Image: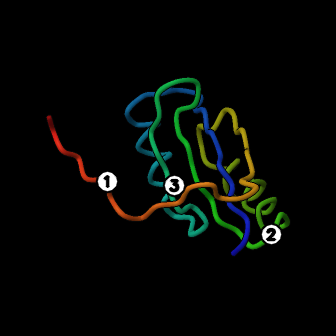
Amino acid sequence: LGLNVFISISLKEQSKSALAEFEQRIAEHDEVMECYLMTGEADYQLRVLVKSLTQFEDFLRHSLTRVPGVANVTTSFALRPVIYKTALPTLDTP
C-alpha cells in the first residue's frame, strides 16, 4: 500500500452521541489506520492507507462522506516520511 492520507474531519455537532456514532462507523473501515479525537478546528484526524488515488476517491465518496454527521473533510497527502518511529521514548522525570 503506497498512499498515506491524513484527513481532518469536522462534525455537524459535537454531542456525545454524535462523537460515539462517528467513532463506531469509522472503525468499520479497514483503510483507517489511526483515528484521533482532536482539539482545534477539526474534531478528528485520520490516517488512511490505500493503494492508489482511485481507491482513495472510492473511500472518500462512498464511505467517509456517507458517515452521518460529517460536515467537513480536509485531505492532505504524505509525500514521504521524514521521521517514523515505533519505539517509545524514555520519559524520565527530573
Mark 3: few, some, or many residues within 10 Å (few <14, many ≥20)?
Answer: some
User: Counting residues from the N terminus, which is met first, the one under dot 1 or under dot 3?
Assistant: 3
Q: Which mark is residue 52?
A: 2
Local secondary structure at mark 3: helix
Q: Give the residue type that dot 3 points to.
A: Arg
Q: Residue at x 81, y 59 (%)?
A: 57
Residue lying at the far right of the rendered structure:
54
Q: Which mark is residue 31?
A: none
Between circles 2 and 1, the one closer to the viewer is: 1
Mark 1: few, some, or many residues within 10 Å (few <14, many ≥20)?
Answer: few
- Closer to us: 6 or 66: 6
Residue under pointer 3: 25
Local secondary structure at mark 2: loop
Q: Position of residue 88 (x, y in %)?
A: 32, 58
Q: Is residue 52 above or below residue 43?
A: below
Query: Where, quadrant-wise, is the N terminus in this rendering?
Result: bottom right
Contact, mark 1 vs mark 3 (Cβ under 8 Å): no
Q: Is residue 69 above or below residue 88?
A: above
Q: Give the residue type that dot 1 points to.
A: Pro
- Closer to us: 47 or 59: 47
Residue under pointer 1: 89
User: Counting residues from the N terminus, which is met first, the one under dot 2 or under dot 1?
Assistant: 2
